[in-house]
Image (spheres, grey):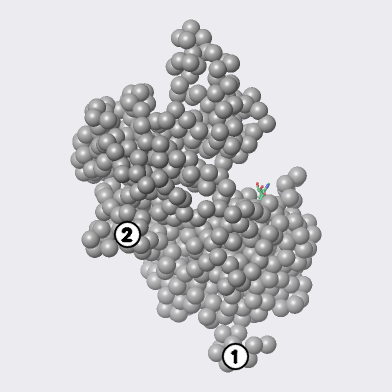
Amino acid sequence: MDTQRREGGHLKRIQSLEMRGISKSFLEVKANQDINLTISSGEILGLLGENGAGKTTLMNILYGLYHPDDGEILVNGEVVSLRSPKDSMRIGIGMIHQHFMLVNKHTVLENIALGFDEAPFFFPHRALRDRIKKLSVQYGLAIDPDKPIWELSAGEQQRVEIIKALSRNADLLIMDEPTSVLTPQETVELFEILRKMTSEGHSVILISHKLDEIMNICHRVMVIRKGRVTGAAPIQELNKGKLAQMMIGRQIALAYPKADITPGDKVLEISGLDVDSDRGLPAVRNLTLTVKKNEVLGIAGVSGNGQQELVETITGLRKPLAGSIMMKGKPMDHADARKAHTLGITHVPEERIKYGIVPNLLLYENSVLKQHRDAPFSNWVQMNYNVIKDHAGKLVDGFQVDTPSVNIKVKNLSGGNIQKLILGREISGGPDLLIAAHPTYGLDVGATEYVRKQIIELRDKGGAVLLVSEDLDELFMVCDRIAVMFTGRFMGEVTPDSCTIEQIGLMMAGSTGSEA
Ligand SMILES: Nc1ncnc2c1ncn2[C@@H]1O[C@H](COP(=O)(O)OP(=O)(O)O)[C@@H](O)[C@H]1O
Ligand SMILES: [Mg+2]
């Protein structure tokens, strides 16, 4: 045993943990195949892999939620049987899921009490309050125990989950994509907490598909692709390029080259725009922006700060209260999606399944969704199916949509392939303006890279692009300028080469550009 740790008083029950030869299938999907994983006290292990690689499945097995078809789990060299999360927690394994499992109307204290087997409302609240206080001081988990959950930000709710796990003596904490709901500032704070935990002998398994984060916080990384381990190494032997390669099996470009062009004429001009949300609350206030030819303007911000309403207004789906929108010098003052389209605006929407496609229509029908009444797809009397299918075939080839044919229902394609099809449809005609909202959300690394490159190509060829994204890496890689939106307003504008992610993070949390 590690005497240094014992002397430091940080001896944990889990000194080492090993998953050996773990396999798990769901019907014909082999989610995990012969996976080996080890982690020791004080270590942060990054678990990296594309969507669907099998990360959550593996962690659900470790947390006792799923039972492996094959393989065993050893703690401190001894085989353990984890039949339920109760077994796992007893041993010292805690897990924080992607979606928090807190009761909204209860307070922090009540939620933490609920985690105990003892009748929760008779639990000695005084003792628990002291314990929460001690843990918050020890690990920097600032939280008000008497606030109801619904009043807390995502970052604060996550802290409650961490305190909940720690108060139940979790030595090993599994976190499934913990930063996907956080602002950059909150992410920095979370990592500080994790560092404190590991310095006290806790261990952490961090699931992420953000390469920067993995490089920043993890001691070791294990990469899973299609249910199998494709690599594992200490962080010192890795870099982002290598990680990405392990994830997708080939090298990706981490920064995208752009043609060196001075932006041309103004394409979209918005000034003094006010828009309300569905609930009648201010969503966009006094917003002014311009996007020119050969330019990508990015809009950064935590979701829910008016981005969606802004996009809906520009694409003619929502009526503004005040302000003007000009497209190539022509006013667009009435909500009219068809007019927006005729003026040269195309749209890759946020909810792509809901608004980007008609799932039950065939691929070729979806390939002309908003243009099906126009020549050459229709002559006003009837649709010209040969021309449409030919067009669909070209999109499939040109935009690398992986499909057996253009005659299948679009709902049978994977998310990445649906997005490639939508993007292809929206940009193949060389639109003057593309509005793309979270175009790579939920896509795997390969499809993400492809979509970003297509956006840049459109810009290089003379298109103007408004890119709304929560992924700062994406904005830095793709945009010429980035405006940061907070409570319906622009806090400031930056160029990717003259600002840091931290500055943007501060603006996303409400500081103006000059303060940040
Ligand atoms: N409960 C389940 N039932 C059926 N299939 C599942 C279930 N959980 C996961 N899968 C499948 O197993 C594969 C791995 O999924 P998952 O572990 O969630 O991946 P990741 O967390 O890496 O995105 C996917 O193909 C997914 O559809
Ligand atoms: Mg997952």
Q: Nearer the viewer, mark 1 or mark 2?
A: 2
* Amino acid at circle 1: Gln
Q: Position of residue 74 (x, y in %)?
A: 74, 72
Query: Which structural element holds mark 1?
Result: helix
Q: Residues within 10 Å of mark 1 (few under 14, many from 20)?
A: few
Foreground residue among 247 and 21: 247
Foreground residue among 219 and 57: 219
Q: Position of residue 468 (x, y in %)?
A: 39, 45
Q: Position of residue 331 (x, y in %)?
A: 23, 28
Furthest toward the top, the residue is: 381
User: Mark 1 sits on what residue?
Assistant: 4
Q: Residue at x 53, y 44 (%)?
A: 450
Which of the labelled discs sits on residue 436, or is there none?
A: none
Q: Is mark 2 within 8 Å of ligand 1?
A: no
Query: Which structural element holds mark 2?
Result: helix
Q: Is mark 1 within 8 Å of ligand 1?
A: no
Q: Which quadrant does the N terminus fall into? A: bottom right
Q: Position of residue 460 (x, y in %)?
A: 40, 40
* Amino acid at circle 2: Ser
Contact between marks 1 and 2 (CB within 8 A): the answer is no
Which of the labelled discs sits on residue 498, or is there none?
A: 2
Measured Cα–Cα span from mark 1 to mark 2:
45 Å
Q: Residue at x 48, y 77 (%)?
A: 196
- Residue 201 visible within the image: yes
